[in-house]
Image: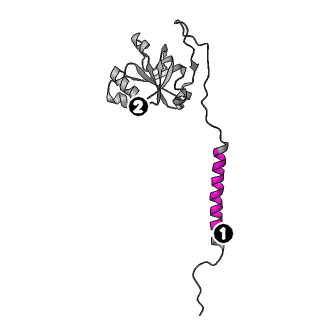
């Protein structure tokens, strides 16, 4: 009797390995091509040089930015003076800071500047405001200073504020109407 080995003696196993390697190489090449040819994401900002506050003179010209743009990538605006027009106060953080939320549910922190605080300016939940001021990077040193000066009144306030990577320090504020409920 003749012995026959159990197993394949065909070349289909070698071709399967070849096709698998070829598919992996093709996918790697496609991914490399995508990385080279895809455009860089860019923030788009709308500039409005002629913005005026009703009854209170002119606002300082600042680059008017859409809330969605700054909330999606605030680091790109750090160090720049901007205007956020007609944003609704989502929630308060103490008495001198508040959150606004973009249409994509991304929160952005705004802190009233020292001059506005000295003038006794306050905002309410749901209030619509227009603010002008520089965007600043958030850091542990900023949070420490805010705790020291009473902006953050508790450890839980600090933990909430730590969520922000940047914030707008409002040097000018125009209060608008209350938000529709």
Crowd rating for badge 2 (residues with CA inside 10 Å; few <14, some 14–19, many 20+): some
As drawn, the residue found furthest toward the left would be: 154
Crowd rating for badge 1 (residues with CA inside 10 Å; few <14, some 14–19, many 20+): few
Nearest the viewer among 96 and 139 is 139
Please, is residue 37 above or below residue 75 in the view?
below
Examine the structure image and report whether residue 32 is included in the region drawn in magenta.
Answer: yes
Nearest the viewer among 35 and 155 is 35
Q: How many numbered dots are placed on residues in this image?
A: 2
3D distance between C-alphas at marks 2 and 1: 56 Å
Please, is residue 14 above or below residue 131 in the view?
below
Image color mode: one colour
Please, is residue 145 above or below residue 15 in the view?
above
Residue 29 picture location, percent across and down: 66, 53
* Residue marked by disc 2: 162
Examine the structure image and report whether residue 43 is included in the region drawn in magenta.
Answer: no
Left-right relation of 134 to 124: right
Query: Is residue 49 at all visible to an observer of this figure?
Result: yes
Q: Residue at x 66, y 61 (%)?
A: 22
Magenta region, residue range: 14-35
As drawn, the residue found furthest toward the bottom would be: 1
Please, is residue 29 above or below residue 89 in the view?
below
Q: Residue at x 55, y 12 (%)?
A: 60
Mark 2 or mark 1: name the one nearer the start of the chain.
Answer: 1
Residue 160 picture location, percent across and down: 39, 30
Screen quadrant of the N terminus: bottom right
* Residue marked by disc 1: 15
Label 2: element kind: loop
Q: Residue at x 61, y 77 (%)?
A: 8
Residue 10 picture location, percent across and down: 65, 76
Classified by dominant secondary structure, the portion drawn in magenta counts as helix
């Amino acid at each position: 009797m003749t012995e026959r080995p159990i197993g394949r003696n065909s070349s289909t196993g070698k071709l399967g390995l070849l096709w698998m390697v070829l598919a992996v190489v093709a996918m790697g090449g496609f991914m490399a091509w995508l990385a080279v040819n895809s455009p860089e994401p860019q923030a788009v900002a709308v500039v409005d040089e002629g913005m005026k506050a009703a009854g209170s003179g002119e606002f300082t010209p600042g680059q008017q930015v859409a809330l969605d743009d700054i909330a999606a990538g605030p680091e790109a605006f750090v160090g720049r003076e901007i205007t956020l027009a007609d944003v609704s106060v989502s929630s308060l953080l103490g008495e001198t800071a508040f959150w606004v939320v973009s249409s994509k549910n991304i929160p952005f922190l705004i802190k009233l500047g020292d001059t506005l605080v000295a003038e006794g300016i306050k905002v309410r939940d749901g209030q619509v405001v227009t603010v002008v001021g520089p965007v600043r990077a958030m850091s542990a040193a900023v949070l420490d200073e805010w705790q020291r000066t009473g902006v953050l009144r508790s450890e839980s306030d600090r933990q909430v504020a730590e969520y922000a990577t940047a914030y707008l320090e409002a040097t000018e504020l125009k209060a608008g109407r209350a938000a529709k409920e």
